[in-house]
Image (tube, coloured by chain):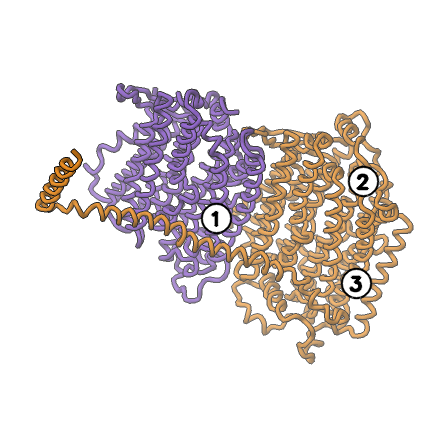
Amino acid sequence: MITLAALVVLLPFLGAFAGLLGGRRLPQPWVACVPVAVSTVLAAVVAFAVWRSPGERTGTLTLIHTGSLPIRVGLQVDGLSGLVGVMVCCVAVAVQVYSVAYMADDRRYTSYAAFVSLFTAAMLLVVFAGDLLLLYAGWEVMGVCSYFLIGHHWEDRANSRAAVKAFLVTRLGDVGFLFGIFVLGVAAKSFTISDVLARVGTMSHTTLTAAALLLLCGVVGKSAQFPLHTWLPDAMAGPTPISALIHAATMVAAGIYFVARVYPVFWLVPSALAVLGILAVVSMVGSALAALAQDDLKRVLAYSTISQLAVMAAGLAVGARSAVLFHLVTHAAFKALLFLAAGCVIHATTTNLLARYGGLRRTMPITFWSMTVGFAALIGVPAFSGWFSKDAVIAAAQHGAVHNGDYAGKMQTGWFAHASTGNPPPPAGTPKDHVWTIHLRPYPELHLPAGVAWVIYLGLLLTVVLTAAYSARAWLMTFFGEPRAVARAHEAPSEGVPEVTVPRAYETSVADTVELSIPAEGEVTKEPSSAHAHEAPKLMTWPVMALAVPAAILGFFGLGASELRPELGSALLSAVLVAVGFGGMWLVWNRDPAADPARALGPVRPVFAKAFYLDELYALVIVRPVLKLARGVAVFDRIGIDAAVVGTARAARRLGGALRIPQNGNAQSYLTALLGGVVVITALVVIFQ
Amino acid sequence: MMAIPACAALALLVPRARFLPDDASLGRFGILVSGATLLVGLSAVTAFDFSDASRAQLSVNRTWESSIGLRFHLGVDGISLPLVVLTALLTFLCFVYTYRHPPAGGRLRLLTALLLVLEIGMLGTFVALDLILFFVFFEVVLLPMFAVILIWGGADRRAAATKFILYTLLGSGLLLAGMLLIAVNAGTLDMTELARRHGAGVSHGVQIAGFLLMMLGFGVKAPMWPLHTWLPDAHTEAPTVGSVLLAGVLLKMGTYGLVRIAVPSAPDGARSCATALGLLAVIGIVYGALACLAQTDLKRMIAYSSVGHMGFVLLGIATLTPVGLNAALFGNIAHGLITGLLFFLAGSIKDRYGTGDLARIGGGMLGTAPRLASFLTFASVASLGLPGLAGFWGEMLALLGAYKPDAGLSRPAFVTFMAFGGIGAVLTAAYFLRLLSKITHGRPRADAAEAAAVAAPTVYEYAAWVPLVALTLLVGLWPKTLLAVTSEPVRALFGGLG
């Protein structure tokens, strides 16, 4: 079992290695796709085995003694990791297959595919790691792979900057994360996850609070939550399949996954959960508003990702762990679907800009229907997967808000994998269950301040409305109305589009799809548009269609578990809210299908479009002072410390110079001095006698 | 008892300059000699008994000057063995590199001879087990390096070389004073003996004074902030092989000395000074990283990055915990491999572009020289501490050590150090990514007509790079290779401390 899990992790890793070393001699698409595909099968086998006989299995390859706590190089398989492992593998396969066609003209497909494989391996390592430091290793490797992949089109400085930003922002959080691991590990005297979880009950509250808050830094960074979310929209500079892989299904999911993995730690620290909840609400509402005003299809999806991850984070904050995992899986399916379908649209129209789309439903029917499924799942149209999972989260939040912050029930111990398929919980005799019951029983009920509970609940409801609105806008502008090339021909380019974002987004799209050596200026004249769009190659549409199936029906799996079944009241409420959001957007759009419905936002539109100017604020408050400090240090080093050193040397030489005067080699002066000395001595002797 | 690397190098020094009519054969000779040394080093690894890594093995112990108890005592244990192999490897790679890429300035014969003497000094430092002998080898290194910088260096080589030698000699003076102070009070010059006593019989005050002097002496070499200013100049001006050895090995002598001599022989002194050492180390980390962020010259930037990285090593030592010392030793090796690689690459870049100035190199190196740029990317990513590559483990363990320092030290202070060390790690990532983004990304400069003609790396360059890359990967993916060797002797060092 553990061997299988190890193979799941190692195969993509070896694929990446072979791809990088083999270069063009190897049939690269095969090197890229086959290991991941095999991994998927193995991951499915692992998950199936865990489902058949639940419980936790660990295996250790070796112990590394560090002088204090050893690092256990080992894996851990249980329902949670089995489920998420399958999810990651599925999306990775879809992305690799899709990329074969999408990146067919790219000269650097080799390194691209290798980094995708390496990335997948790192994510799987995070999923299956049995040791916190091993998990951290995978966590960071993912970060650097995302750096390489976002910066894939490095010819453009903007992409390079986006890549650097993504890495640095997440790394900033990761430092806190590493310290959190230290705190937990040292307190538990082991970095092994199961040991740590078994001993959380014995840790002091201060330790746990510190650990939980520090770990949150990393989670917030990776899962792109406020205030470290700013890297994600910029990360859209990467090729679209990468957006699907990293920014929908895997890397950003890692943060949520991690909280779920070490949930007992957070469960015991309601204050950390409250912080998580508040950050989540800020993220979900803020980014949903920002998504409302974006001009770039991928950025709309990026902000929606932040928003959806925040829904998960909020769910974690209210103790709905199973619901969150449910939503994690459904979100991975429908968001990957949306991104890949968006890639088809971009491929066909060679632009990212919503304003240049329109009427695509006729020319790209497959993409249209897939994307419709994706959007339906995203906004939570009843019976689509997102409706079930989001509703489970909302129901939990509602329960807490109504009961003044008391969340019903104990921590949900049932692993999602068997819970969702209706399997009974593990028999009480298994050793793992033993550990759980022993250490779960003393857990108090979760209690958040009533205000926080209400804020989370209302935030979630507001997000449902906004999600419906921005999805409707993107959907309508892309697939309905007239093809834009005609419409734009007699329309002055004076709509309220913020000037700055256009060229960059546009360049990105050019770099994305057109052969790289063509200079961007030459391409501008071709006026990309939706007029002559056509369906994307089969290798691209197949994965999209394949993903559309789970995006549509995955929700029904939740019916098997009691805590995931929709509750009538909240389900109806959210359906009504969806209708409000969608209907409102449709009314605005219908008045003038050629124009951008975001115009209804009026003066706040630029504020939303720039995501509340947070980037500018960070640049002003953090980036520039650091650079200034750096320059100051460099100058100080030269004229401060080094000058002191050189000055010391000069002083020494001057002192030496003074001493050199008597030793000028002139015998006459020596003799004179000698005589003078004798005279002085004689005089002294005479005087003092 | 078998011959050890230092003896081999010594013996092979004799026939230099007698034969070898031309540069090519001279180069081959250099490769041969250093290769043989490397082989001896590797055979020492095979002969080494890993189950007893804390004992000095393969040792030679003869009376040298009986009147003052001076002994010619050499040997390796788990602490020095990795460094010995690293030294032999880097010197060998330097010779391989020099064979096709000699530094401007000719006089290859002299260079070969100097590098060999340098190798003797470096190896000797790591295998010496007698204080005076250690000091002799420690000093032997200085003059060849001085000459290498002075003769084959860049434009400002005179000032840089002078600063280097004066500064390090000053440090050596303090070091000698410190070592003698301890030795005279303890009554022995033998390092194994001193380590076994754990400072017994030496009064507290003497230990503090001794440790302080040694800390300053080794701190100049390490380099410890604020004693680092010789380093950027020396690195920038030195030829490629000089920089590689300087960064790869010479800096390690300082931290090695702290671990090998200062901490075990004056543990009380170490405890009293550890907080100060930790503070300076952390300042070095953050300061080095900030200085890097503002550099415009490639080699200078790498040089300042050494200040930051060695800061992590010093922080590890300052924690006075087994994990901290392991981190220091690990960091030593990792830094040697990675920074060695970085300086090789910087040398190649400077050869091709004729400048180390970031702005003049321009961007787009991934397009014009993809292989070179890929190696540079790899080295930078390794250097910024990516897990899975060598740089990570040293940093991570040092921070872990700082989270829980020795019981006699102030925990809040060290936790603060840890936090700042973490910020330093972020800044490290920032400047390396800035470097990559500046020269490997973007489009090449419009006026760089020669950019298209950037030569592909030669076989000899690959030969110098690939072993370092491979080892970085090996040590990074499987840190046990190193930790298993160092853990036991480190624990032995703490026999009287913990």
Query: Disc 1 vs disc 3: which is toward the camera?
Result: 1
Element class at badge 1: helix
Where is the N terminus of chain A found, in terms of image quarters?
top right
Element class at badge 3: helix
In-image side of A486 versus B369 (left or right): right
Q: Amino acid at mark 2?
A: Leu
Mark nearer the N terminus (2 vs 3): 2
Please report the residue visible at 69 percent of the width from the left and 49 percent of the height from the top. A249
Q: Amino acid at mark 1?
A: Tyr
Q: Amino acid at mark 3?
A: Ala
Q: Which is nearer the eye, A631 or B490?
A: A631
In-image side of A229 versus A452 (left or right): left
Where is mark 3, residue-wise? A469
Colour chain A is painted in: orange
Task: Tell me the tag on residue A446.
Answer: 2
Residue A330 in the image: above or below residue A287? above
Q: Which is nearer the eye, B244 or A639?
A: A639
Residue A81 shows in this picture: no
Q: Are marks 2 and 3 on the same chain?
A: yes
Q: Are marks 1 and 3 in contact (CB under 8 Å)?
A: no
Q: CA distance from mark 2 to mark 3?
A: 33 Å
Tell me the subunit letter for badge 3: A
Q: Residue furthest right?
A: A568
Q: CA distance from mark 1 to mark 3?
A: 49 Å
In-image side of B20 versus A674 (left or right): right
Residue A592 in the image: above or below residue A230? below
Where is mark 1, residue-wise? B287
In-image side of A173 versus A403 (left or right): left
Q: Are marks 1 and 3 on the same chain?
A: no
